[in-house]
Image (spheres, helix red, strand yellow):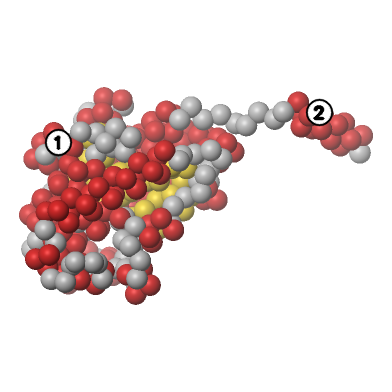
Amino acid sequence: MKDIINKFKITNGEKFSLKDHDTGYSADYKKDDTENILADLIRQMAKLQSALYAGNRFSLLIIFQAMDAAGKDGAIAHTLTGLNPEGCEVYSFKQPSAEELDHDFLWRHYKALPEFGRIGVHNRSHYENVLITKVHPELLLKEKLPGIMHVKDADKKFWDRRYKSIRSFEEHLTNNGTIIIKFFLNLSKNEQKERFLKRIDNPEKNWKFSAADIYEREFWDDYMKAYEKAIQETATDHCPWYVLPADKKWFTRIAISAIILDTLKALKLTYPVLPKEEKDKLEEAKKLLEKQ
């Protein structure tokens, strides 16, 4: 799976272009094999999660970004099922509240970071502040930013500073033990259309559909440009992006699990080794228990 992982990994943003990524790619995998493959990957992840929790030296932050209907919720559910829920935290970020707008754009995301030993999942993230605000810059006016009184004030220098803030934020986290995985689920516009139609036709999925989804779809090209620019500006060696084909949900889930597992393996996690004094106490406790 290493070749597949490297195929999706973006560390040098300058060389990245969305047009080079096939949204329907699935390598040589077959849909019928998904259940067995995922079960094996999750079993391995669960063992490493236990060592991550026990070691309490690293945390793992997994970021999911995508267009509507790309399968973020399902991917999170299928790839984290089987892990210890005590060691996982999932946050879904909606429109910022009045309190959140009274702080800088990173504040609410910093508050939601996983503790050492835990896995945190951000369903949407701080990247919304260079995605939806890039497509709808009028939203910036709610942030009460110095010097941004009109939409036209958000010039190239403004966006360059915001990308820099994100790079610095992620570098700081990485330097302090939070390992970051950033997933962009790359869905085609046609596949999104088909999934929207299924949501409308299926009463059990009607709740997932909103008229706003159709409105945002009109800005598809703008969003693709915003995603491409965000990835170009923030893909680094210490904080790579993974641009995953999302037209086939089953393959997306395999890729996500493989990348999480590979990232955990790279940490070379081990269980804490007790000092001799503590081991001696364990032996004493064992003897006492055996006598009871």
Q: Quadrant of residue 149?
A: bottom left
Question: Pointer 1: residues within 10 angstroms few (<14), some, or many (20+)?
Answer: few
Q: What kind of element bears circle 1? A: helix
Q: Choose between 174 and 121: the one closer to the eye.
A: 174
Q: How many marks?
A: 2
In the picture, the disc for residue 14 is: 1
Whether 196 is drawn above or below 255: the answer is below
Please name the amino acid that badge 1 sits on: Glu
Q: Quadrant of residue 255?
A: top left
Would residue 191 be seen by someone viewing this image from the given angle?
no
Could you tell me which residue is drawn at 22 percent across and 30 percent down? Answer: 7
Quadrant containing the C terminus is: top right
Question: Pointer 2: residues within 10 angstroms few (<14), some, or many (20+)?
Answer: few
Could you tell me which residue is drawn at 37 percent across and 46 percent down? Answer: 62
Q: Choose between 276 and 5: the one closer to the eye.
A: 276
Residue receiving disc 2: 280
Q: Choose between 264 and 231: the one closer to the eye.
A: 231
Whether 157 is drawn above or below 142: the answer is above
Q: State left or right for residue 230 relative to residue 182.
A: left
Could you tell me which residue is drawn at 31 percent across and 61 percent down? Answer: 105
Whether 174 is drawn above or below 102: the answer is above
Please name the amino acid that badge 2 sits on: Asp
Give x and y (percent) for residue 184: 24, 46
Give x and y (percent) for residue 277: 78, 29
Give x and y (percent) for residue 206: 25, 69
Q: What kind of element bears circle 2? A: helix
Could you tell me which residue is drawn at 50 percent across and 34 percent down? Answer: 48
